[in-house]
Amino acid sequence: MVTPASFNASLSDPAPPRELTAPLTALWWAKMGDWEKAHRIVMDEASADAAWVHAYLHRVEGDLGNAKYWYAQARRPAASGDLDDAWAALVEALLNAAEKRTK
């Protein structure tokens, strides 16, 4: 099982852990500075989690109108505030959700 600590530790690896969901993989690539790769991953997903990450990515890009659309698709309130804090909160929430699904 991937924990927030092991997820963060994996950022020194050349590729994300294989067991990550697509939204978590996108967040991994986003943290590595590959916005395009992260965006392509969530573009191909139809889940609310992918839409949530998609919204975050558009905040990173500075396209707040598009971010607002994706927050609505994710059924989440539009976020504001620090992007690093938002990234960490997303990682934790998605890892917790993945853990609950495996129990």
Image (cartoon, rainbow, N blue to C red):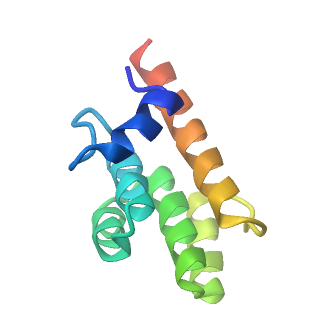
Compare residues 95 and 73 and report the one nearer the observer.
95
Q: Is residue 86 above or below residue 13?
A: below
Q: In the rendered image, is residue 27 in sight?
A: yes
Q: Is residue 14 above or below residue 18?
A: below
The quadrant where residue 33 appears: bottom left
Compare residues 3 and 46 and report the one nearer the observer.
3
The quadrant where residue 65 appears: bottom right
Q: Residue at x 62, y 67 (%)?
A: 71
Horizontal side, residue 54 vs residue 17: left or right: right
Horizontal side, residue 90 vs residue 48: left or right: right
The quadrant of the picture occupied by the C terminus is top left
Residue at the front extreme of this rendering: 12
Residue at the top extreme of this rendering: 103
Q: Residue at x 26, y 44 (%)?
A: 13
Q: Residue at x 48, y 26 (%)?
A: 3
Q: Residue at x 33, y 59 (%)?
A: 45
The quadrant of the picture occupied by the N terminus is top left
Q: Is residue 20 above or below residue 3?
A: below
Horizontal side, residue 50 vs residue 17: left or right: right
Residue at the right extreme of this rendering: 81
Q: In the rendered image, is residue 75 in sight?
A: no
Image coords of residue 7 (percent x, y): 42, 36
